[in-house]
Amino acid sequence: MQHNVLILDFGSQYTQLIARRVRELNIFCEIFPYNHFPTDLSDYKAVILSGSPFSVRSEDAPHPDLSQIRGKLPLLAVCYGAQYLAHFSGGEVAPSNIREYGRANLSYIKVNEPFFEKVNAHSQVWMSHSDTIKSLPENGVRLASTNDVENAAYRIEGEQTYAIQFHPEVYHSTDGKQMLENFLVNIAQVPQNFTPNAFVDEMVAELKEKLQNDKVVLGLSGGVDSTVAAVLLHQAIGKNLYCIFVNNGLLRKNEFENVLDQYKHMGLNVKGVDASGRFLSELAGVSDPETKRKIIGRVFIEVFDDEAHQIEDVKWLAQGTIYPDVIESVSVKGPSATIKSHHNVGGLPDYMKLSIVEPLRMLFKDEVRRVGATLGIDASLLGRHPFPGPGLSIRILGDITLEKVRILQEVDALFIEGLKSFGLYDKVWQAGAILLPVNSVGVMGDERTYEKVVALRAVESTDGMTADWVHLPYDFLMKISNEIINKVKGVNRVVYDISSKPPATIEWE
């Protein structure tokens, strides 16, 4: 794998967006916590420092050792990073006299500076800080200002070190992508060779070398990630890939049969295993979301282990882990804390004695889809919405019963089919229904009812790291609400979730 750009994460909510923007330039990058990054930087062509919720003036502020970076590699410091360089290099950082958050416009740009090449005069940028740089660090040269922020951007004389107090990675910084391109391509001269075709060629070759003639077992889910991982592995090792699709009893309506049928024409060796009774039995009476996730993870491994033992000499477990799973599962002092466990990230119990191979571990979801298209996978499969590994268990708030699963499967099927029939499915990143642990009073005919409430959720996103709720048409919501209440016994009220991520998450548990 290429190691071109290193992003040091100081806990900013926008760190993943920096990576997305860099990847959009066909440049490979990796995110590491500021206090745990590689000691060998020989493969890297440039480094970016992220923003942070901390103040550089606080005692517990992130304080990385940049001795192997500063002056040796092209460096771009964003927001907190810019203040960090100033504060510890002879400049002054102090609390802002005014609130510096939101849209601003550059009022001054130093002429003939490569960092601002092709950037419009008065370009809009996005500010997000409570401190400001009062004076530049030693050898600092001011490059840009806004009406309220004198030192909005600067560089260090004699180094390829640039610093900006705004966020170029967010949509509101209209020329932010151009600035990143100027820094990475023109100044740091990082090659733009991270393309889907290049990834496939490189990954297939890497898998062939790593796996040789070993047998690999893969848990298919029917989703985009595991399917693309399977096809990549199939290209590399052919018949030595054994795919297992486990029905945990928490899939969508008829999904077990539909997914197995879908794979018949793809040349993959797939076995379906119905373990729904075992999962539901283990989950009986459990309400805590994290406990539910861990039970499902444990039982899945047990079922999977039973099946893997039926394959002689299997050496590897393949997983469809993608980069957001990896990022969200890292927890250190500073970067964002882990908020939930991931079913497909982390080690295996010792008794499985399988090594893990994760061919998509460094890709965002939209990149996985582009790789899948390069591999010739059907567009309808690649366009499927993400579905959580724990399935409907985390969309049933509270304990899980067979009846609750039935209700939610019916509601979910009506919602998803409705989106498709209204031509809305492909405009939505992810959609689903949530069964709430409350009953509400209703009237059906001449009778009062006291039945379940369901919430519908539809979000738009690029990679799931941030998401906005979708403004679904009122006539669609009215029709689906009526259908659900009329057709699904046990539901008498439908609500629509209009929360964005952050502060909410896409799933409710």
Image (tube, rainbow, N blue to C red):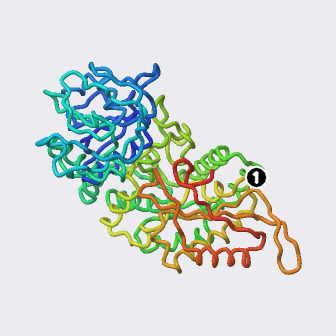
Figure check: 44 above or below 509:
above
Quickly name the residue at label 1: 284
The quarter of the rendered structure image containing the N terminus is top left
Q: Secondary structure at mark 1?
A: loop
Figure check: 257 above or below 25:
below
Q: As shown in the figure, which amino acid type bears the numbered disc 1?
A: Ala
Query: Residue 151, image x and y in percent?
Result: 27, 33
Query: Residue 476, image x and y in percent?
Result: 58, 76
The foreground one among 484 and 252 is 484
Query: Residue 53, image x and y in percent?
Result: 45, 34
Q: Quadrant of residue 507?
A: bottom right
The foreground one among 394 and 230 is 394
Q: Which residue is the extreme one toward the right?
A: 447
Query: Residue 215, image x and y in percent?
Result: 41, 52
Residue at the image position 16 percent from the left and 48 percent from the top: 117
Crowd rating for badge 1 (residues with CA inside 10 Å; few <14, some 14–19, many 20+): few
Figure check: 265 above or below 43:
below
Q: How many numbered discs sit on the rendered protein?
A: 1
Side of 488 where 146 appears, left or right: left
Residue at the image position 44 percent from the left and 35 percent from the top: 11
Residue at the image position 65 percent from the left and 59 percent from the top: 275
Residue at the image position 21 percent from the left and 21 percent from the top: 138
Q: Which residue is the extreme one toward the left?
A: 112
The foreground one among 326 and 442 is 442
Side of 64 where 495 appears, left or right: right
Side of 195 where 51 appears, left or right: right
